[in-house]
Image (spheres, rainbow, N blue to C red):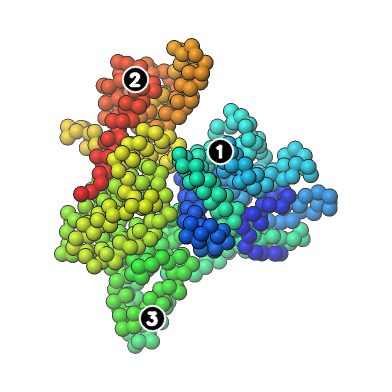
Amino acid sequence: MDAGKLNIKQLFQKDVRYIIPTFQRPYVWEQEKQWEPLWEDVRNLAERYAEALVESDNQEAVAEEKTGTHFLGAIVLQQISTPAVEIERRDVIDGQQRMLTLQILLDAVQDVIEKEEFKRDARQLSRLVLNDEDFVEGDDIFKIWPTSGDRDAFRAAMTNGHTLEGYEDSKVVQAHEFFSLQVKEWLRTPDEEERTRKVRSLSTALIGLIEVVVIDLKTNDDAYVIFETLNARGTPLLASDLIKNYLLQTASSKGMDTDKIYENHWKDFEDKWWREDIRQGRLVRPRIDIFLNYWLVARKQEEVQSHEIFPSFRNYVEEAGSGFMDIVKDIQHVGETYRQLDSFDPYSTEGTFLYRWEIMQAGVVTPLLLQLFSANKNQLSQERKELCIKALESYLVRRMICRMTTKDYNRLFLELIPKVNKNIQIADEVIIKHLKSQTSESRLWPSNDDVEKAVLDLPLYRLLTRGRFRFVLEALEEINRTGKAEEAHTPRGSLTIEHILPQSWQDNWPITDEDNPQEYLKRVSERDRIKHTIGNLTLITNKLNPSLSNGPWAKKKQGLQDHSTLFLNKILLSKFGDSSFSEKEIKERSQELAQQVCSIWPISE
């Protein structure tokens, strides 16, 4: 058995055939849980490299070292005996979802940049996806080969120019389309030099800055025993276990009553709630370890990686010296605050923010939130606390809608912690001033013009996760409800996003008044783009969704009129119920909704 850390180039550059055995699961990764976090990690890595390249006067090796690498997890392979004249083969014993996603991502990027005429970078990426056609035949061209149920869709998705008709429900195809769209939008800029820099940075990030641990088993190694061992028959110690033991040992060495300290300050952390695994981006960790990570960041005012929690905590306690009990009490107090984040009225200012914050997976803001929510009313008034979280929400949502990078969030919010700590009584003024003072693209608080342009032009339905786009529509529904509405608040998380002009519009929404073939094709292209903008989207119940489906406008109008009580749909019918609904109306509605988006999430004064 060989084990080592490899970058993507080292894993995929050689001619090789990674085969996912039949007993493995089909491809099941999803946009919200895996594709979106992976793309954000890759994009942020590429953007950090681009910055480092400029700072190092285009010295690529220096820039790579400064950027660092991104660890993506472990993969277990097993060698298959093959004749010397054939390419190497490996069975994928563990990590097949990760490997398939990497191949889909690489191919999507390659396809996009080849169409953008970046031939050299496209060839480099193609070499990581396809084997040398002079040495292989048929499907052996692909470096990875999925289980039987995914093969046809995989072949279609990974072959440039191949039709995807009939495979729309395949997660392989959906992943390829997701990554392709994200790359296109990220590269979109009129500045040719900037686009070239982005392509080069993305290629470098993918090829050399993403790493995996590869365990390569010999043909005679027992793959199943090793697989079970790797997946841990026992329960490993958590960082929180190490911290608890260290605190009690330290207390004992100081002559303190450890039973009393445990009972009064740590016992509540033994509750099952704290031990539950929760998702944090691509990772799943116990809630208590995540909390302690955030607490450390807030107190040390520096980044603390998940694998550094215990040593970082130990150093912090040692440096504190006589303040040992203050630390113990602070952990308890802030822990109570963290747990109370689950108990706010869901439609209060705090509850609404926390609902959207969780969907945005903006965990990087948590240390700052713990500061704000831990302060008592004498330190920070309720009114000012609400102004703080409204400003933070506006900043995060506006940047999300404008598809702006999150790569600098760590440093941005770390900078705020000491400023807020020093002036907690006026924390709202501190936060607003700090956010409004940012001028770089990676930190800018988008203007109304920026937001309106994004809402009008971007296919947000495709670019945002369903949860993120849904809460934007929920907020629009909420702002349009009057005091006389039967229900004061919009249901959350249960409504379905519906395309008014259907995604498959050709049958029931034909373009019939265009004789010029070029103009017709232009209009088809425009429809396919604009159908995913906010002006063509609304909310409906799950029960109503199948009955509307791809039906014509007349049928949709009737269905909404008969069964929908949502104000978004009442307003839609009042404005467009007596007319057609096509490109012109979609743009008009987008403009109105864009202005409402800006009013829901204003730039604070």
Disc 3 to disc 2, C-alpha distance? 68 Å
Q: Nearer the viewer, mark 3 or mark 2?
A: 3
At 47% from the left edge and 27% from the top edge, which residue is drawn? 528
**Would residue 214 appear left or right of 376 to someone viewing this image?**
right
Residue 490 visible, this angle? no
Residue under pointer 2: 557
- Identify the disc placed on residue 116: 1
Q: CA distance from mark 2 to mark 1?
A: 41 Å
Disc 3 or 2, which lies upstream in sequence? 3
Expressed as whole percent of the image width and height from the top left, the position of residue 527 reads 44, 25
Amino acid residing under circle 3: Glu
- Identify residue type, mark 2: Lys
Q: Quadrant of residue 413?
A: bottom left
> Label 3 belongs to which residue?
318
Q: Quadrant of the N terminus?
A: bottom right
Quarter of the figure with residue 449 = top left
